[in-house]
Structures are given as C-alpha cells and as structure tokens.
Image (spheres, rainbow, N blue to C red):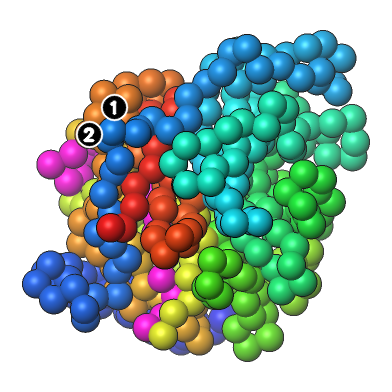
Amino acid sequence: MRLTSTLLYSILFVGVLGAILSCESSASSETNNEDSWMLGPFTKLYDENPILTPSPELTFVDPISGDAVAYEEKNVLNPAAIVKDGKVHLIYRAQDSLMTSRLALAISEDGIHFEKTGEPIFFPEKDRFFKLEWPGGVEDPRIVSTEDGGYFLTYTAYDGKTARLLSAYSKDLITFKRYGSVFKDSIYSNIWSKSGAPIVRQRGERFVMTKINGYYYMYFGDTNLYLARSKTLVDWEVLEDEEKGTAIEALQPRPGYFDSRLVEPGPFALLTAKGVHMIYNASNAKNLNDNELEPYTYAAGQALFDAVQPWRLIDRSNSYFIYPEADFEKEGEVDLVCFVEGLVYFQNKYYLYYGTADSKIGVALIN
C-alpha cells in the first residue's frame, strides 16, 4: 500500500502533535486513571521473579548437527504468552552456549509458576528455511489467536548476519506450518526486519487477529516502527510513501526521552474503543537522552494509534512504565534490560512477561 505525500504530511503532523500532547496525557493519567487510554499500572512480582531461568540440564537432539544440545544452557529471554486450555503458555527464546536460539514452551496454572515441557517446540531444521535460520536460530516470538481457533506466530530468523521477519501457524502450539518470510519476494524480504506485532481484539482470555477495512495489520521494526498489511496472514505488504517509495515510520525515537535511541513493538497491538493501543520497548540514547536512565537502558512505554488509520499516531506516553530495577534486570548477557514481549488476560488479571538483561524472565501484573 502506498500513501500520498499529502497524507504522509498529515500523519507526520499528527505524530508531532501527539508527542507535544504526550506530557499532558501522562499527567492526566496520574490524576484521573479512568480517562486514561494506557494500560496499568503494572506491579512486578519480586517475591517470585525471575520466574524462568536457564536450565543447563535440558537437552534435545539437534536436527542440524545430530548431537545432543543443552539448548538453554546460556539464556532464556524474549517471552511470548497465550492462554490455552485454561493455562498460560509461555513461548520463550532459549539460547545455547554457542548463542544459537530456539523457541521453547513452559506452562503454568497460575501465570507465575511454570513447568518447562522439556524440548524446544520450534527450531532450525534441514528445510528450505535453513539458510535464513542458521546459525543464529529463531528468536523474538509473538503469538496471537486466529479466528479459526489456531495460533499465528511471528519470529525473527537470524543467519548470523541479517535478521528477517518470518511467520508460522499452529493448531496446538506444538507443530507449526512455516509460512516463511512475511514479505515474500519484495525488497523487504532480504533486509533487516524483526519484531512483528499484529493488531488484535480481546475476546475474553483470547487476543484474536482482527481486520480493519478488510486487512490484517502488523507493526514491525527495531529502530523505527513500520506497518504492514495482509488479507491472508501469509503475504504482507509494507505501507510506503508513494513519492519516496520508502516504508512509512509509524513511531520514531524522541530526543530527550526514554525512547531516544530506538523503539520496538511489545506483545501485540490491541484494538480498543479509543484506538489501537501498543506497549512498546525502547532504548535510551547516550546523548540527547532521558537523564533519569543510564544510556542504553531498555524500558517500555505505550502508544495509541487511530482505529481506522493505524499508521496515524494519536498519543504517546511521556515516560516509561517498566524499567530495570533489580540486580537480575540490570546485569546479564545485556545489561540494563526490561524487554516486554508477552501479555495475557488470565483469571481476570493482565499478566505482562518480560525478559531481564537478556538472561532471565520476569512477570508483572495489574492488581
């Protein structure tokens, strides 16, 4: 989809206006939470956190090498989450000693205490996607429900040089049909892309893929946020500026704020009566940054987009709502990281799952 330059200028104007108003919006949310569009406040469960840590004793036979591999010997991180059969299913990135990543599954009856299933559920194999997924592996999952009762997975394939956004479909969260590159044969299929967060509606405990004017939409990117659309979930097209032929930036870093270095999608984007609500991850730049955070700190904020034109920014939080505080959030494979990637509505509460210092996994919830 290509948008005219006139419409693009309108979008940019709204984005600037949203940034200007974000301070007023954040102030009003503190004094009158009923009028706020933001989700929260979230409370970290420090008595339980971290809820998931690496298990060096867990092994499986890797189909590439044929050897038994301790697949999460190094780190567990980047958790996606979904409710299935009355339990929380956490699909997380497991990293071995060679830094190859696979996706593993842990299940919980209370959303806090998880039992690992014992082997990865999604990993590189000797198939047509091997060259995209090896040796770096598969990373950064997002998982949502589909209208037919299945599950749509987006993930990052990393060949050691380039990260590419891929997708898959499952009926049971155990076996997956790989769709391959989200962008198929377009120019975007072979350039750096990751972190696909579809727009969904909440239906009870399910977050279901939903169409807007006949299309599914997905935010993606890990410096600026872009937007793609699809009618089938298989083939996606990137929204572009008609004159420039470049992808439209739906959300950008802001000098002087917690998100001054980069922005990246969180779990998914939620279509509500007030618009499309997104929890997003951000990093603080070394210069022109938020002086309350150390440079390169990963924290999370929230943004609101138009419900009919999801590329149009309406509002944006002035500050972060989750950031590294505990030692296990500050020190690890990558220091100073709280990276949000999983959100469920379970037993009448929202549970937010996040990676800590790229090494462990924590949870926060709305009381």
Residue stretch in magenta:
274-293
Q: Are marks 2 and 1 in contact (CB under 8 Å)?
A: yes
Mark 2 → mark 1, Cα distance in angstroms: 7 Å
Query: Quick one: 221 or 325, which is closer to the camera?
Result: 325
Tell me the SS state at disc 2: loop
Q: Residues within 10 Å of mark 2 (few under 14, many from 20)?
A: few
Which amino acid, by three-letter code, is at mark 1? Lys
97 displayed left or right of 326: right
Residue plotted at (40% across, 25% down): 334
The residue at which mark 2 appears reads as: 325
The residue at which mark 1 appears reads as: 330
Q: Is residue 158 visible?
A: no
128 displayed left or right of 5: right
**Is residue 107 inside the magenta stretch?**
no
Query: Quick one: 249 or 317, which is closer to the camera?
Result: 317
Residue 292 image offset from top left, x and y in percent: 13, 41
Residue plotted at (38% across, 30% down): 50
113 displayed left or right of 186: left
Which amino acid, by three-letter code, is at mark 2? Glu
